[in-house]
Image (cartoon, coloured by chain):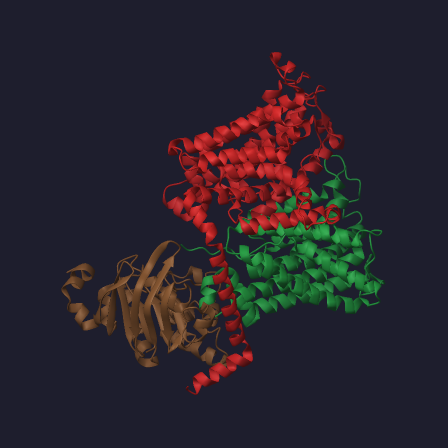
Chain colours: A brown, B green, C red
Amino acid sequence: MMLRLSEVSASYGPVNALEGVSINVPEGTIVTLLGANGAGKSTVLRCASGLLRPSGGTVEFRGRQIQRRPSEAIVSMGIAHVPEGRELFAELTVEENLLLGAYSRRDKKGVRQDIGRMEEYFPVLRQRSTQAAGLLSGGEQQQLALARGLMSRPRLMLLDEPSLGLAPLVVRGIFEIIQRINKEDGVTILLVEQDAGLALGVASYGYVMEAGRIALKGDAERLRSDDSIRRSYLGY
Amino acid sequence: MLLTPSPWEDPSLFAEQVIAGLATGSIYALAALSVVLIYRSTSVVNFAQGEMAMLVTFSMWSLTLAGFDAWMVIFIGLALGFALGGFVERTIIRPVEDKPHLNVVVVTLGLFVFINSVATWIWAQGELPKVFPSPFGDDSVDIGPASVTTHSLGILATALIVMAFLYLLFNKTKIGLAMRASAQNPTASRLMGINVGRMLTLGWALAGAVGALAGMLVAPVTFLYPSFMLAVLLYAFAAAVLGGLDSPVGAIVGGFLVGVMENLFGTYTPGDILGPEMKLPLTLLVLVLVLLIKPTGLFGREQVRRV
Amino acid sequence: MDIWLFLALTAGCSAALRLAPRIPDAYRVPGSVLVGLAFFVAAPILLDDFRLFQLSRAAIWVTVAMGLNMLTGYNGQISLGHGAFVLMGAYTSAILLDSESQLGFVDATPWPYWTTIIAGGVIAGAVGLLLGFPALRLSGPYLAIATLALVISIPSMIRKYDELTGGSQGLFIDQPEAPFGLAEHLNRDEWLYLVTLFVAVFMLVVAWSVLRGPLGRTFVAVRESETAATAMGINVARTKVTAFTISAVYAGVAGATLTLLLGVMTPESVDITTSINFLTAIVIGGLASILGSIIGGIVLVLLPSEGPELVARLPFVSEETVNRAPGAILGILVIAVVLLMPYGMAGAYHRLAAQRPRTVMRATRSIPAGARSRLREMRENIRWWLEDLPWNRAKAESTRENGP
């Protein structure tokens, strides 16, 4: 099991954000986390990457407990988190952002090769290589954020709402790349999404969250055909 | 009415003043570099920079009394400045880094007062000012119409070397990139695997070393007393801002500009309306005018903001 | 009465009314304000002349602090140079009150003193309005340095144009006495104290009404995000210039009052250190808070003169140390306050006031528990740090690559 959350609870000050959340992400799969705004999906990712310390429960990555480790250590273990809002280094160039993605690596030649690979996956990055990241359009920024995450050659990627604010055509492209990363590079993905239809199209398993708890879980096929999901999240 | 002859009438006076201005300017440039260093790596302006440099310089002065020679003292001073900068960041700056920005400013102001007082207590009991030796010797060299001390040339060389070092550090090294990233976006930096705290400490430590270097090279010129870095630091801040707070090249250019302006305004202002005592306000006026045209300084990078 | 007793009583009674359990909520804030005010009005009876003089200066600094807080705390523009506006207001008042006319077109009779306070505000405000526009271009440290440049330059200019300003020697004025029959009961110092108190209270009330209205909210909106504010239809430029102008008016009014209090005005009366300390004062007192401005002004007067002495009274501190390095104690105090109360003293107070008394008791009891978890954290951090050392990390990586 690549990532396992067991009975995790977490809070932001006096506000409880997660309560008894248990999630399993098997190696090599795409698992999606669905739910309305404020359900706690981003919080789950934050607990996994060390940005937030859970108040209870455990988070295991490849068998090792990581819930109390600082982010910088967790990331070096092989987890890449592409957060909500992307959190790019707006004043640094596209290339510098990519280099920073590979910060925890030591093989300079491999890093150079990977930059080339990223520019192949996302051609727009090559064009804008020396531009400040903050000047890119929304879709380009999301591509850069994904590429930056990939630069660390992670075992597990945590993606937070990659479709947010993007045009449908661009989103389709992003999701194609997500599938490609998963199949070709074997990267396990935990995907948080509001667009349930899109997410269930690429994932093999899904969890639905409500008010900080898991309300529903199951194979993506089953969830897609579930009536309540269809009505609440897919709109038909 | 101009009391002094215009540059066309007496070009050698003009040249002399410009060269003298470049000499003092290199002092400001060196001090400005430490200001830029801290700002670039931690997004903070450290008002206690000068006092920390003064503390190290005085400590090194005590060592010179014990017989250490000028070069040894420079290297020990660099190490001490490095340690002091890192220590200050780790102990009193770290707790306020994630609080409202002004809190850090006030902490540095408090630090300023503290260090100044402690230094006065320890070293100012004897007679002031003290003499601090220059590692570059006491000779003078003639450049055109003006005579320049070897010490001034030494400062100039040092400033340029430090500038090159900082430029390479920030733009060509992995750790320099990590420092810049940590200053801009600590959260994202942590997600890259960067230990943000360590980067900030490193930034302050380096700035402490450069500041100490500036202090030890200024002291031979201005002599050593507890407030000797005050005037220098004022001009250093002006120079750093003029050149752009995040640009080492800007600090050098700014330093020279400020030094030359200070000298020229002191020499050439008409006595009735303005006068040599207005050289500071006039220099600052030029600074403000430049800022109005380029709000982030001559070489500063524009703030990129995309909501 | 000892000044500390006085301040403790004022703060204590005021806070008691605000926090005590059985008072109807509607009376809490007005009650605490009135009680505090009553103490300050009664000060001439309770305190000696020297302390009264200190409180007069504090009242003036409170006025400056309130203006600066509106600019920096509520609106987010940093100014290190408000001492310049104080000087402008002060000199306006001094020139108008001076019996030998310094201006060719104004006749030599001194103006009534209360009009000079208004004039000081107007002149400083006009300059603030002028400077507010270029200030729009700058932000953060660049704005701070530009305003610092202002306050550094003003004394030189004052010294230079000495026909108008009396140069380095400054201007002397006749200080006002208490009016009508009150002169029998109040000596001049006491009257001046009441004048400064009145000015401070008046300006605070004006600030309170401005800040709780739409303008106040606009200030904060612009501080939080100029882009979002523009999207909401706020004219950001006009808001920022308004904030600048208002804060300059406050400084000018305070300056004019300062002239009255001191009886003389020189270019050194408000120096660079004081100007920078206005910022320190509002940070320590509390940003974006009226109470914070009040505390800041008082702290600004009392901390430098009384702080080290107060620390010397502590059992483990030697008097000799304090006498030789008073600045060190001052610096430590400032740093300590900022570290322990990151939102200022007013911030700490407001947090307390927002809780119910029982919660406060529970909070104090949980301190040892907090300390224990902090120690546990430190132990873990040391363990992770050891693991992160290059040779240990290499060992861990190789076991990871080669499988467990």
Quadrant where the image shows the C terminus of chain A: bottom left
Name the one closer to the observer, A65 or C90. A65
Name the one closer to the observer, B77 or C71. B77
Name the one closer to the observer, C85 or B280. C85
Does residue C8 appear left or right of residue B123 in this picture?
left
Residue C231 in the image, given as x and y percentages of width and height: 37, 46
Residue B65 in the image, given as x and y percentages of width and height: 84, 63
Residue C17 in the image, given as x and y percentages of width and height: 46, 34
User: Which residue is found at the position 41% from the left and 31% from the top?
Assistant: C27
Image-quadrant location for residue C170? top right
Does residue C52 appear left or right of residue A130 in this picture?
right
Residue C152 shows in the view: no
Examine the rendered structure and indicate whether residue B8 appears above or below residue B93.
above
User: Which residue is found at the position 71% from the left and 46% from the top?
Assistant: C326
User: Which residue is found at the position 59% from the left and 66% from the top?
Assistant: B202
Q: Residue furthest bottom?
A: C402
Quadrant where the image shows the N terminus of chain A: bottom left
Number of numbered tags placed on the structure image? 0
Examine the rendered structure and indicate whether residue B239 appears above or below residue C116.
below
Examine the rendered structure and indicate whether residue C276 appears above or below residue C40.
below
Does residue C239 appear left or right of residue C118 in this picture?
left
